[in-house]
Image: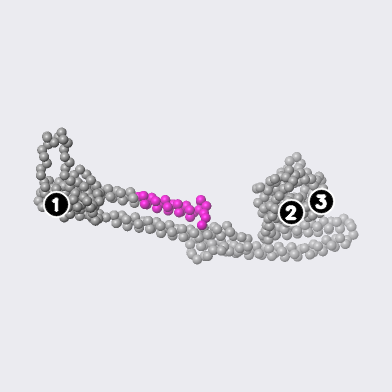
Amino acid sequence: MSMNNHSIIRIVTFFFFFIFIIINILFWIARQHFLEEQMSDRIHRFELAQRLIHHPSGNFEEELKQLFITTSKLSSTFIKNSAKELAEFPFGKIVEYKQRVYFIKLPPPPPPPFMASFLPPPPPNHHFDDLVFEDLKEESLWLLWVTFISIDLLVLLFFGYIVKKLLPLHNLKNAIVNFSDQDAFLNLPISGKDEISQITKEFNIVLDKIASMRQARSLFLRNILHELKTPIMKGLLTTECLESSEHQERLKQIFERMNYLLGEFSKMERFNSGEWQLNLMEYRFVDLLDHTCDLLLCDKDSFIIQAEEKSLIVNVDFELFTIALKNLLDNAFKYSHDKPIITLNTDSIKICSTGYMLSDENRVFTKPFNRTYENSNGGLGLGLYITDAILKKHNYKLYYSHVLGVNCFEIILNA
């Protein structure tokens, strides 16, 4: 499951991982502190027991039990050889044997040689030379371990629960990314009652409405286009049968304008309905230009080619891209008395022609309707809108500029 660096699941995972590490570090610190406190208490009790050896008062064994200590039947020699040493200090050693803790009393260290003649010998106390104390106080880490493991398990279970709840959100994002115009629903199961399931359900409802509206719009436009095409063609044929006059020419212009607009609306409907799918292949620009000339019923003498890159190869949909070129060249022919100039570069195609600067309204190619076109040859500016849509479909960009009375439309191939 791939996720970006800003994914909620990734952030939650990092947060829980950080908390998990902090909990384990705190447990280790608490464990070390507990062991140090346990050893300090043990040393203190063994020191008190050692004092009782030299200063007995009453029942020795009872006094030891008050310190949670008793004398062991094991010999000091056996314990020294078999037990694991835990701590050592000048007068004794603490060892562990079979999960029991013992204290072995050591003889006092001999005085330095230069002091031996001045100090009296230590009083004999042979009765305690082989004495081994056993710690009766059972101090276990089981409660600390149980607490630590319980907290870790709770954190892991909570993390699993959160990820399980967030995973549908990740799947919803992927479904939206992979959603196509042909889909009416997101391909996701809706089983829960949480917010993500509700969002998916509402999203499917919206998609269903959009699909219904798209279908109704497409059906309506196709019916309109089909019903209008027949009377327009009949009107054109009828005007051809009339005698030449001002009224006949006026009628002809009206029907030609209607036929032109009908074609533009048809192209726009195909774009909006998603019927036009790109079939990208590499073509020589000269081949694309030849087909464009066939569409415009013109020859290559109608324009000038300035080619810095004579063998320009473009990766395009042949039909769509030639329509875009046709629209740009058609505008250049209509609104200029000079020959348009086509300039080919490695990363751009520029079509320039003399003429007035386009108005602000006509320079917004994302709008399909521009009311400033009022003659029969102009249409409603749908040509530039369709051209811009085609180029965007190819991930190209269309730029317009006007310098010294020259209009330039530039197609950026490496957008």
In the visual, does 226 lie left or right of 169? right
- Secondary-structure class at tag 1: helix
Residue under the point 81% across and 45% down: 338
Q: Circle 1: is it few (<14), some (14-19), or many (20+) Cα within 10 Å?
A: some
Q: Earlier in the sequence, mark 2 or mark 1?
A: 1
> In whole angstroms, how far apart are the C-alphas of marks 2 and 3?
15 Å
Query: Whole-percent x and y of residue 61?
Result: 13, 53
Query: Whole-percent x and y of residue 126?
Result: 11, 47
Q: Which mark is residue 63?
A: 1
Residue under the point 66% across and 54% down: 393
* Residue 238 is a magenta residue: no
Q: Which mark is residue 299?
A: 3
Residue type indicated by callout 2: Thr
Query: Whole-percent x and y of residue 361?
Result: 70, 48
Q: Which one is in front, 48 or 354?
A: 48
The residue to which callout 2 is attached is: 322
Residue under the point 11% across and 40% down: 121
Residue 71 seen: yes
The reply to whether callout 2 and callout 1 are in contact (CB within 8 Å) is no
